[in-house]
Amino acid sequence: MPPSEGPPSEGPPSEGPPSEGLLSDDEHWVLSYYRTSEINGSLFFGRLARTLKPSPIQHDLTKHFADEAQHAWYWTDCLERLGTRPIKLSDAYQDQYLEAAGLPANLMEIMAITLVFERRVINQYAKHLAVPDLRVEVKKTIERIMRDERWHVQWVRDALAGMGDKYGKDNIAATLRRFKEADREVYAQTLAEHEARLGFLLDSRPNPQED
Ligand SMILES: [Fe+2]
Ligand SMILES: [Fe+2]
């Protein structure tokens, strides 16, 4: 199959007329960055899912990593619809985040780091949705992804709530605070590092789900 056709998929429908004009370099880079981050998320959660014993968490984490893999495909497909291909990028948000936060030591910490990260993802996509005159392909891709991301936040939050007896509620709250701090730090660094490319997102409406 020629690479331009891609596999059959239930990717975002391309309703409405295609957007006019080529993607700017900044948009091209940002959408490629999202794709790389989704791939990293899928690989991270996939590896984790492989280590878990049968349990509700094993079930949900498997759906979770499958979703993230789909999201990487949606961005690939979206870029294709916009007449281009993803840029090959070496690092993603997760790499720096894990470096700043430290590797999670147990399942509770994994859930906590995931919750903070998934909130960041929703926040970032919401900011992007607020950019004026967004291309229809990008808007539909983000909206579709966000439906899954909301479920990610929900199941992880529920899983954490069920861990209070085993790990202690105060300990869980302290862990969440620690990872939130790391996330804020890394996000600020990311914005500073890629200020020129992400500048078009900076003036967007702040998201109420920030904390
Ligand atoms: Fe995702
Ligand atoms: Fe997610």
Image (cartoon, rainbow, N blue to C red):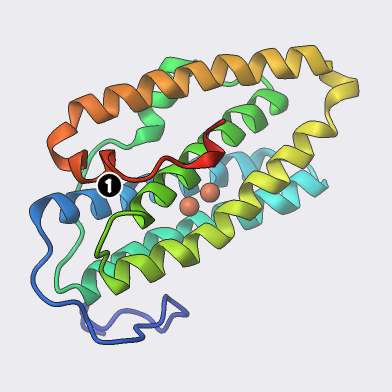
Classify residue 175 as left or right of residue 88.
right
Give the left or right position of residue 70, taking residue 96 as reference. right
Q: Residue 139 falls in which quadrant of the image?
A: bottom left
Q: Is residue 99 above or below residue 116?
A: above
Residue depicted at x 69% and y 22%: 106
Q: Is mark 1 within 8 Å of ligand 1?
A: no
- Where is the C terminus found, in terms of image quarters? top right
Residue 204 image point, x, y percent:
32, 45
Tell me the quarter of the image containing the N terminus.
bottom left
* Kind of residue at disc 1: Tyr
Left or right, 134 with respect to 51, comes to left
Left-right relation of 180 to 172: left
Is 9 located above or below residue 142 in the figure? below
Figure disc tally: 1
Q: Is residue 71 visible?
A: yes
Residue displayed at 13% across by 77% down: 20
As displayed, is residue 94 above or below residue 26? above
Q: Position of residue 170 (x, y in %)?
A: 78, 12
Camera-side residue of 22 and 207: 207
Residue 66 visible here: no
- Does dot 1 land on a helix, a strand or a loop? helix
Place of residue 176 in the rendered image (x, y in percent of width and height, measured from the top left): 63, 21
**Between residues 12 and 202, which one lies in front from this camera angle?**
202
Q: Residue furthest right?
A: 165
Q: Which residue is mark 1?
A: 33
101 to 123, vertically: above or below = above
Pointer 1 local density, CA inside 10 Å: few below 14, some 14–19, many at least 20: many
The residue depicted at 27 percent of the width and 44 percent of the height is 201
Residue depicted at x 45% and y 24%: 183
Closest to the observer, 68 or 127: 127
Q: Point out residue 93 in the picture as x, y percentages from the top left corner.
A: 36, 34
